[in-house]
Structure formats: structure tokens, C-alpha cells
């Protein structure tokens, strides 16, 4: 007890613990252990403990060993002032001590599970653990007093879960403190020359009276309860505030800074800083006279432990006076202390490495080794089955998880192998204008990248003559034909030479595999293969008022919102089929607002594949819901572009403080709508949010998310044993671009098919053959297009949407191009300009076409200078689309050269969900045997439906005829008189059934079948 009391004084005087103090505690612990051993020397040990090394009767439990390891780390200087310790160093010490006591090795997964349960762990920061020093010290002091834990240490360690998905017990939520200041008043009085306040003295700052005992001070404090009493007289008078005071409570530190700045033009003396508690406790923070210059900020440290004594009111009193004045000012602040719930803390995520046999198969291009194993044969048969089976029969309830797992691993291995080929041994890194971003020219690499994307991980090895090789990690920001732009974890010397190795970030892959594990555990695969529609509800609650007036005359949107709000599809997912421009996002927002109004206590999860889609939903919801009801949960990577976020969006997010913070459990409970990306949903699963928390899950852009990606937002988060706990809404369009798959083999196996598209192919979601209508209780198709001119919709409407779309865009916005003198057909705002240029391939598989770049420049220059039918066209009105990144870069350089910065250039993928008044499309391919990946009908549909008033397609009409879908578009333009440029003829003989890549895969599987025979 005496030792604890002295520690409290140490808090008050020094404000922080020194390493020497902790070392002293450690010596006390060691001395106490030696005394225990000496006292037990004569006792007989059990046989199983008879070992020369183990000379003690009782062994520590794993938590005690963990505390000792942390103490050793702190003594060795491995635990910094913020309480962070590298995980590998802590694990090494823990492993050694555990083996010393138990002769038992520990696996990394078991150690991570133990850390996850430990009350000492605040959070995991990359590969470091942040320890709560406030909790660590009392535990060490208890150990010094000889307090022992009676639990069976071996049993408690073996009962730790080895993975996050194996246990669903909620962790104990230890409350944190929220401390802030509230200004009360400032009083002035004459300086008392004969009163001098000393450190730790028993004196009252207000009355300037000293006492001989703590009891005397306590009785005195009860008189005015720490409040400056102006009415009582004594020369006190109320004046204006003299100081700017800011207090920032540090949840993870031992002290918190109190910053004081003078409001006066001249210097000020700060006399003393005291904290009073309503129970008459006195905490002197500062008692010496300090000179504070004008605009100078002085920091004082308040010990955090004083706020744990009680959650009642504290008073902060600061005395000051101006130089050469005899008036003393006392600033009075109320310190408000409240308990808050701790932040979410994600558990450990397994690595989920693929089987060695699968790695060997993919590395050898699906060729088995000479010593064929049964596992290799099974995996090869599974890959061939997935590649040769139709989409509707590929996945079943029995093989659902296993087949998806193979797809994910194949995709991961293919990308890893591709990136492994792209390396440089003597690359030069050049700094850019952005801090910590550097440029690496592609000429330094041994091969051109074929599968490189933003977000991939880059590892640099710098040769330092003083420190040897230095490893630095970073991420790829931008991939350009001439160079890469990378962002490193720290600054490096400019123009230095280094080795470069690339690898893919496996986080998404691991989260998807975790989701499959949870599907297996909860046995919910059958829920994603519904066979019969749900029983119709006896009563459907009608919606009396619409928040968005635009829905009042739209029957399809009203039906969708009413059925979503009434959960008519549960337990089946409700599908919102939204073709281009039909108001899919508007319908989702209305449904969410209606649910919040009807059931204010229910929690809703809103998610999408991209952050842009999540941001759009959050901004729209802010128009209808109070900001306190919304939480935009960003991933840590968004912190880098925090300045680019709109202020209203930032204020409702976990970046509202200016830095990344995990939301607290209290925020999660008090928020009605949580908006985050699909990947971030996996983090919620790691935090073990209870499955019954969310009652509704909305997945927007579900058509562009792979099936495993959609499962990340569902498995474990809203599933329990054989049950779906939430109503699920999947929104998207199966005829627009699907998931981005960077492996051709994985795409061939079916990873490119979304959950939404697969479900819509099931009989239960198809149209009734008799009525030719969807069952609106489980699926709604929006038909009214509010974006484009009717003629611009005509081709896609006939080709993809069964001619059901109705063009309702305002004529004044989309019809001004009609009768333009340069239109081949005055009533059809489409131009197919045929160019017989030469395509060039100079950067991996990407292509460019200089002739088409020239033609795009011609149209841009003419339209921007002359306008259309008297209407001025701005740069913001025009969008340029090309399916090849190399052509996109050439077009961007054109716009920069011609000073057209606001003309937006992008790929088809980048334009999905976007719209422009005028769209110029460059197809690039020319004089090739096939159209390559232009053969994707979904890519064609997206490209055709971005324009509102005018579409100009520039390409080689002969090459485009190689693909059946493009052949139909070329024929559509020719039959409607919308063609200019080189003349050509139509010939169905030019259609190529398969591209070269498709023929390659067909040949590969034919050869495999021959080997089997």
C-alpha cells in the first residue's frame, strides 16, 4: 500500500513513469520470486514437474507470462511512450518464457488469440500491439504484492480460439473516458504579496489560506465547493476571459496535455494550475510563476489517473496576472468526465495460404508433376469442371464453398506469379510533388507489367553503406506506360538506386476466404440457392408519404420501396434490377429512409464494392436523415486523401477528428445507418459484431462484386446457424460490367459472375412464363430511364433489356442535338466514324491508336469552339471513353496539351455509373484477327449508355465486325444511316466465334482430356 501511495505521488510530480521505475518493479518481482523458491525448497515436486530447469512449484498462467514479457520489452526500450511494441519481439519473448515454464511451444495463431483476449491490448497498429500502460502498471504492482491467480494456466491457454471464426463469444467491453473542458467564469482580485503557494502544500488558491492538515483543507473546501464565490465579497469581481485553454485527453497515455495561450497583446505570468475535485481532493499541476509571451502556447501535463477516481465534476483553476500589474485573474473551468465505450477491435485474420499442390499446378500452367498425387488430381478436375460447366450448373449447395475457395486461390496465385515477373534490380526512384510519393521508370524493369494495378504492394531494398540493406514497403498509386507512381511508408533519398519487388495485397482474398469459412460454420450455403418464393405476408403496410417527390408517379420504384420496407422477400434476398439511368440509387435511398422512419431502433448496413458508391449513398442520405443517425466507416487507406473528402461526409465518418479512428461500440449501437465498403464489412466480422445487430443489409453495385466479395458483407455478420438474421437487398444490373478479375483462368472458372447475376438465373427469380412478369415480392425491375435520348437507348434496350425501357429524360436536356447539320441521321444522335488506323501495342497487353486520337481531337476542338445548334458546350459536358489504358493515357496527354483539363477521360470501368452530355468512344482495335476483350457484351452496354444527348463512336468497322455484339451495333448504325468516314460492307462471315485467348483455353483443356484418356 505504501508503495502504491508513493506511485500516486510519482504520478502527480513527474507525470510519467520512467524506465528506472519499471526496472525497480521488475527487480522487486524477481527478488520476491527468489524468496518464494527458497521458502519452498523442501517441498516435494510431482513427478511430471521433476525437471532440473523447472525449480518452482507453481507456474505462471499465460496472462502473467504476457505481462512479464511486456515489462521486459519496456525495460529494453522496445515499448514506446504510446505503449506500442512490435508483435514479433513480444511473441519471441513470450514464446521463450512459455517454453521455459511449460516445455511447450506456442504457435503464432495461439499467441494472437491470447492477445485478442487480453485486457492490456488497446488495438493492433499494422504489425504492432498498442498496450494500455494504465492497466499494465497496477497489474505489475499486484504481482509485486504476491497476488496469485488460481486458474489452470495450461487449460486456459489451450482453450484460446485459434482463429477469429472459431469463437463468437463477445469480448468484455472495457469503458474508456471522455474528458473535455467547459469554461465557467473568470474573476479578478488584488495580488496578495504575503501568500506564496508551494508544491504539494495544503493551501486554497481561492482564499489564499494555508492549512496544517489535509482535514483542515477538506473542511475548508466544503465551504465553497471549489467555486469562486463573487457574491461573498473578498474583492472578487467577474471579468472577461484572459486565456485560451485547450485540453486534449489521451486515452492511451499516462498524461494529457493542457495548452494555455494568452488572449492579451502583451506577456502574462501564469502563476499556478490546480485541479479540484468535488470530494475536496487537490491536485497541483503547476505552482511556479511562468512567463507567457504574446501568442506563445505553453503545455502542462495532467496525470490521467486522477480522472479514474470518480466520474463526478472536476474544476480546473488557473491563476495569472499581467506583467507590471497587481491584479490576479483566476480562470475557472469545469472538467467533464464521462465514460465511453471502447473502439471496435478486430481479431486476428488467418493468412489462408493455398495448398502446395494448387500452387504447383498454377505455377506449372496446370501441368501435373511426375509423381501425381490424389490432391493434385482432385484440384485439376475441379478447375476443369469449373471451366467447362455452364454458369447455371457450376455452383451447387454441396460444392459452393469448396469451388469458390479454389477460384479465389487461383486468382490470387495467378496475380502473384504475374507480379513476381515484374521486378528491377537497379531502379532509380525520383521524388514527386506529393510527399512520400516517388516515380519509378518502367525501363528499369525486366518485363512490362501485364497485371499491375493501383493498390498492389511494392517492396524496395535500398543499399545503404552505413546500415546495409534497408527494406521499405509501399503501395502502387498509379500505373502509366512510362513509369509507376508509388507511395512509400517513409521518405527516402532522392534518385537513389534500389531493388524493386511487387506483390498483391492479400487482404481482400483473406477476407473472402474467412467469409467462406463462416458459411461452412453456420451452414448457410442453402440460403443462397432458394428454390421456392416466400409465403406472401397477410398484411402489407402501405407507404403514405414519399420523402422524394420524384417517386410519386413511378410505379416500379414505389413497388420496390414498399416491398423492401415490408421485407416481403425474407429470408430470400430482394433483388433491385436497375438498368442504366433508371434511378436505382434513388430507390435505395428512399427505402432506407422509410425503414428508419418506421423502425427508428433498427440498424441498417449499407455497402457497395467501391468507396465512390458508398460516398454517393451517404451524401444522398444526409438530405433526409439527421447526421447523428449516419456513420460512414472508412478504411485506414482513405486517411491519405482526407482533405479531398466533402466536409459533410467527413463529419459523419470515423475521420471526423482529422485522423483515422475505429468507431466505438457506443457509436455502433446509436447509429441507425452504417455505410462502408464490402472490404470494411469484413473488418466488422473480425470485430465480432453480433449477428442480430443489423436488421437490413443493402448491397449496391452487387452486379460488379464477385460472389465471395458479397459474402464478406453477409457471412458471420448477419448469419447464425442455418439462419439469415437480416433482410438482404441486392441492387445492380447483370447486363453491366461484372467484377474486376485479374486472372483469365479464374474468370473462366466463374469468379467473374456476381451473386446478383447467378441468383437472377435461378428459376425462382425468373419471369413467370405465363405473365412474362417478375415476382415483385422478391425482385423488381426499374424501367423508366431518366438519363438518355430515346435513340441512344434503342440499341441497348433491344439487345439487353427486352425493349422494356421507357425514355423519360427531359427533352430540353437531351434533344438539342437533333437536326444538327453534322448528324448523318438528323433524328438519331449517334455517329459511327470509321477509321482504318493502325493499333500499336507497346505496354504489356494494352494498346493505342494514333489515328483515333487525332479524330477525337477533331471532334473535341470543333464541338468546344462551335457548340451544337447554338448551344454552348463546356469541357465538363464531354466525356471520353476507351477500353485500353494506354489509349486513355494518350487521350489524357492530348487534353493536357490542348488545355482541356476539365474533359474527363477514363476507361469503361471508370465510367460505370457515370453520365455525360456528350460521349466520345475510341475502340482502338484495328486490323486484328479479333476484338480481344472488346468481345465483352457488358462492356459494350456500359459504353453505349453513358451519353445523354450525343454518342460518337470512333473505330475500325471491319475489325468490330469480328464480334457478334459489335457486329449488331455496326449494323444498327448502318441501317439507320448513322455512319461517316470510310465506306465498308457488312459480312457475317467476319464474325469470329472465339478470340485467340478463348481458343488457347479450349486447346489447353482438350489436351488435358487427351492425357486423361
Image (tube, grey):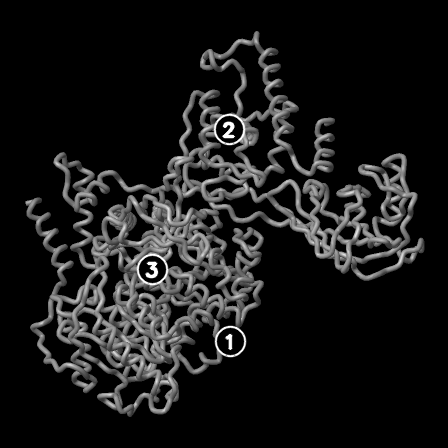
Q: Is residue 724 above or below residue 816?
A: above
Front residue of this view, candidates 441 and 621: 441
- Seen at 51% across and 28% down, the residue is 62
Q: Give the percent coordinates (x, y) of residue 681.
A: 43, 54
**Residue of label 2:** 62
- Identify which residue, 41 or 905, lies in the foreground: 905
Q: Which residue is mark 1?
A: 547
Expressed as whole percent of the image width and height from the top left, the position of residue 996 reads 13, 60
Q: Secondary structure at mark 1?
A: loop
**Visible in this render: residue 367?**
yes
Q: Which mark is residue 112?
A: none
Q: Nearer the viewer, mark 1 or mark 3?
A: 3
User: Quick one: label 1 or label 3, which is nearer the N terminus?
Assistant: 1
Please report contact status of discs 3 and 2: CB closer than 8 Å, yes or no: no
Instruction: Return the x and y of residue 147 as percentages of the image width and height.
Output: 63, 25
Does dot 2 land on a helix, a strand or a loop?
helix
Q: Residue furthest top?
A: 42
In the picture, residue 560 is in which quadrant? bottom left
**Earlier along the polypeptide chain: callout 3 or callout 2?**
2
Q: Residues within 10 Å of mark 1 (few under 14, many from 20)?
A: some
The residue labelled by disc 3 is 705
Q: Residue at x 21, y 80 (%)?
A: 832
* Distance from the alpha carbon under mark 1 to that under mark 3: 29 Å
Q: CA distance from mark 3 to mark 2?
A: 43 Å
Work out whether 481 lies above or below 924: above
Contact? badges 1 and 2 (CB < 8 Å): no
Secondary structure, mark 3, is: loop
Residue at 46% x, 11% y: name it: 52
Which is nearer the N-term, disc 1 or disc 2? 2
Amino acid at each position: 500500500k505504501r508503495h502504491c501511495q508513493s506511485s500516486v505521488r510519482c504520478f502527480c510530480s513527474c507525470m510519467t513513469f520512467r524506465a528506472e521505475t519499471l526496472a525497480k518493479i521488475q527487480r522487486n518481482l524477481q527478488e520476491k520470486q527468489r524468496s518464494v523458491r527458497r521458502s519452498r525448497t523442501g517441498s516435494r515436486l510431482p513427478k511430471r514437474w521433476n525437471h532440473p530447469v523447472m525449480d518452482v512449484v507453481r507456474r505462471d498462467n499465460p496472462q502473467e507470462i504476457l505481462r512479464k514479457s511486456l515489462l521486459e520489452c519496456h525495460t529494453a526500450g522496445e515499448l514506446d511512450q504510446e505503449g506500442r511494441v512490435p508483435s514479433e519481439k513480444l511473441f519471441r519473448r513470450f514464446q521463450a518464457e512459455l517454453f521455459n515454464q511449460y516445455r511447450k511451444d506456442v504457435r503464432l495463431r495461439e499467441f494472437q488469440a491470447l492477445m485478442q483476449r487480453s485486457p492490456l491490448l488497446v488495438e493492433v497498429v499494422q504489425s504492432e500491439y498498442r498496450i494500455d500502460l494504465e492497466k499494465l502498471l497496477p497489474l505489475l504492482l499486484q504481482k509485486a504484492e504476491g497476488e496469485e491467480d488460481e486458474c489452470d494456466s495450461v487449460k486456459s491457454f489451450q482453450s484460446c480460439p485459434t482463429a477469429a471464426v472459431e469463437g463468437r463469444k463477445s469480448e468484455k467491453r472495457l469503458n474508456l473516458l471522455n474528458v473535455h473542458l467547459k469554461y465557467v467564469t473568470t474573476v479578478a482580485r488584488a495580488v496578495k504579496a504575503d501568500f506564496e503557494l508551494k508544491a504539494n502544500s495544503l493551501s486554497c488558491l481561492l482564499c489564499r489560506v494555508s492549512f496544517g492538515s489535509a482535514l483542515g483543507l477538506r473542511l475548508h473546501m466544503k465551504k465553497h465547493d471549489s467555486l469562486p464565490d463573487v457574491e461573498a465579497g473578498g474583492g472578487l469581481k467577474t471579468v472577461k476571459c484572459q486565456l485560451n485553454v485547450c485540453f486534449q485527453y489521451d486515452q492511451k497515455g499516462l498524461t494529457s496535455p493542457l495548452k494555455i495561450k494568452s488572449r492579451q497583446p502583451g506577456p502574462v505570468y501564469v502563476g499556478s494550475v490546480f485541479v479540484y475535485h468535488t470530494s475536496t481532493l487537490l491536485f497541483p499541476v503547476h505552482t511556479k510563476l511562468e512567463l507567457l509571451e504574446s501568442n506563445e502556447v505553453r503545455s502542462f501535463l495532467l496525470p490521467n489517473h486522477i480522472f479514474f477516481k470518480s466520474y463526478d465534476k472536476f474544476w480546473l483553476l488557473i491563476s495569472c496576472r499581467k506583467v507590471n500589474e497587481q491584479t490576479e485573474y483566476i480562470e475557472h473551468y469545469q472538467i467533464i468526465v464521462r465514460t465511453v465505450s471502447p473502439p471496435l477491435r478486430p481479431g486476428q485474420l488467418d493468412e489462408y495460404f493455398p495448398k502446395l499442390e494448387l500452387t504447383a499446378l498454377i505455377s506449372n500452367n496446370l501441368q501435373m508433376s511426375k509423381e501425381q498425387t490424389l490432391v493434385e488430381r482432385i484440384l485439376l478436375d475441379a478447375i476443369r469442371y469449373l471451366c467447362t460447366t455452364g454458369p447455371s450448373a457450376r455452383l451447387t449447395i454441396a460444392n459452393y464453398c469448396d469451388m469458390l475457395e479454389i477460384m479465389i486461390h487461383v486468382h490470387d496465385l495467378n496475380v502473384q506469379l504475374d507480379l513476381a515477373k515484374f521486378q528491377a534490380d537497379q531502379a532509380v526512384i525520383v521524388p514527386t510533388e506529393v510527399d512520400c510519393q516517388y516515380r519509378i521508370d518502367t525501363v528499369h524493369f525486366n518485363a512490362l507489367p501485364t497485371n499491375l494495378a493501383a493498390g498492389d504492394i511494392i517492396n524496395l531494398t535500398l543499399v545503404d553503406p552505413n546500415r546495409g540493406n534497408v527494406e521499405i514497403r509501399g503501395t502502387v498509386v498509379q500505373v502509366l506506360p512510362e513509369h509507376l507512381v508509388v507511395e512509400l511508408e517513409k521518405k527516402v533519398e532522392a534518385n537513389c538506386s534500389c531493388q524493386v519487388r511487387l506483390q498483391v495485397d492479400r487482404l481482400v482474398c483473406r477476407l473472402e476466404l474467412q467469409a467462406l469459412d463462416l458459411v461452412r460454420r453456420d451452414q448457410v450455403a442453402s440460403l443462397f440457392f432458394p428454390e421456392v418464393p416466400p409465403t406472401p405476408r397477410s398484411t402489407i403496410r402501405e407507404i403514405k408519404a414519399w420523402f422524394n417527390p420524384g417517386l410519386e408517379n413511378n410505379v416500379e420504384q414505389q413497388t420496390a420501396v414498399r416491398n423492401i420496407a415490408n421485407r416481403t422477400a425474407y429470408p430470400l434476398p430482394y433483388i433491385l434490377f436497375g438498368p442504366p439511368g433508371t434511378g436505382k440509387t434513388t430507390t435505395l435511398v428512399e427505402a432506407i429512409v422509410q425503414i428508419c422512419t418506421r423502425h427508428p431502433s433498427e440498424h441498417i448496413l449499407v455497402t457497395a464494392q467501391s468507396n465512390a458508391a458508398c460516398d454517393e449513398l451517404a451524401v444522398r442520405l444526409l438530405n433526409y436523415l439527421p447526421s447523428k443517425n449516419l456513420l460512414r466507416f472508412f478504411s485506414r487507406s482513405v486517411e491519405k486523401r482526407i482533405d479531398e473528402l466533402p466536409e459533410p461526409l467527413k463529419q459523419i465518418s470515423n475521420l471526423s477528428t482529422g485522423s483515422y479512428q475505429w468507431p466505438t461500440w457506443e457509436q455502433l449501437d446509436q447509429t441507425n445507418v452504417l455505410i462502408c465498403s464490402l472490404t470494411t464489412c469484413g473488418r466488422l466480422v473480425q470485430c465480432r459484431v453480433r449477428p442480430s445487430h443489423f436488421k437490413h443489409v443493402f448491397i449496391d453495385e452487387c452486379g460488379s462484386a464477385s460472389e465471395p466479395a458479397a459474402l464478406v458483407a453477409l457471412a458471420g455478420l448477419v448469419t447464425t446457424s442455418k439462419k439469415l438474421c437480416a433482410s438482404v437487398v441486392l441492387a445492380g444490373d447483370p447486363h453491366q460490367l461484372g467484377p474486376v478479375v485479374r486472372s483469365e483462368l479464374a474468370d473462366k472458372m466463374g469468379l467473374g459472375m456476381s451473386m446478383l447475376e447467378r441468383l437472377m438465373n435461378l428459376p425462382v427469380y425468373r419471369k413467370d412464363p405465363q405473365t412474362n412478369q417478375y415476382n415483385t415480392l422478391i425482385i423488381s425491375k426499374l424501367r423508366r430511364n431518366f438519363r438518355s435520348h430515346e435513340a441512344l437507348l434503342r440499341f441497348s434496350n433491344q439487345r439487353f433489356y427486352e425493349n422494356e425501357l421507357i425514355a423519360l429524360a427531359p427533352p430540353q436536356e437531351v434533344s438539342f442535338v437533333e437536326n444538327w447539320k453534322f448528324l448523318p441521321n438528323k433524328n438519331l444522335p449517334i455517329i459511327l466514324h470509321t477509321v482504318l488506323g493502325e493499333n500499336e501495342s507497346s505496354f504489356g497487353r494494352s494498346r493505342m491508336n494514333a489515328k483515333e486520337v487525332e479524330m477525337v481531337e477533331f471532334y473535341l476542338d470543333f464541338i468546344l469552339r462551335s457548340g451544337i445548334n447554338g448551344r454552348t458546350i463546356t469541357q465538363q459536358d464531354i466525356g471520353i471513353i476507351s477500353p485500353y489504358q494506354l489509349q486513355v493515357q494518350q487521350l489524357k496527354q492530348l487534353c493536357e496539351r490542348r488545355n482541356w483539363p476539365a474533359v474527363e477521360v477514363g476507361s469503361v470501368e471508370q465510367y460505370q455509373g457515370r453520365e455525360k452530355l456528350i460521349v466520345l468512344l475510341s475502340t482502338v482495335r484495328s486490323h486484328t484477327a479479333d476484338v480481344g476483350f472488346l468481345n465483352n457484351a457488358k462492356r459494350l452496354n456500359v459504353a453505349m449508355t453513358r451519353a445523354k444527348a450525343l454518342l460518337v463512336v470512333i473505330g475500325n468497322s471491319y475489325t468490330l465486325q469480328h464480334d457478334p455484339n459489335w457486329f449488331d451495333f455496326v449494323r444498327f448504325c448502318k441501317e439507320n444511316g448513322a455512319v461517316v468516314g470510310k465506306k465498308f460492307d457488312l459480312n457475317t462471315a467476319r464474325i469470329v466465334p472465339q478470340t485467340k485467348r478463348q481458343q488457347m483455353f479450349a486447346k489447353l483443356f482438350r489436351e488435358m482430356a487427351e492425357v486423361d484418356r
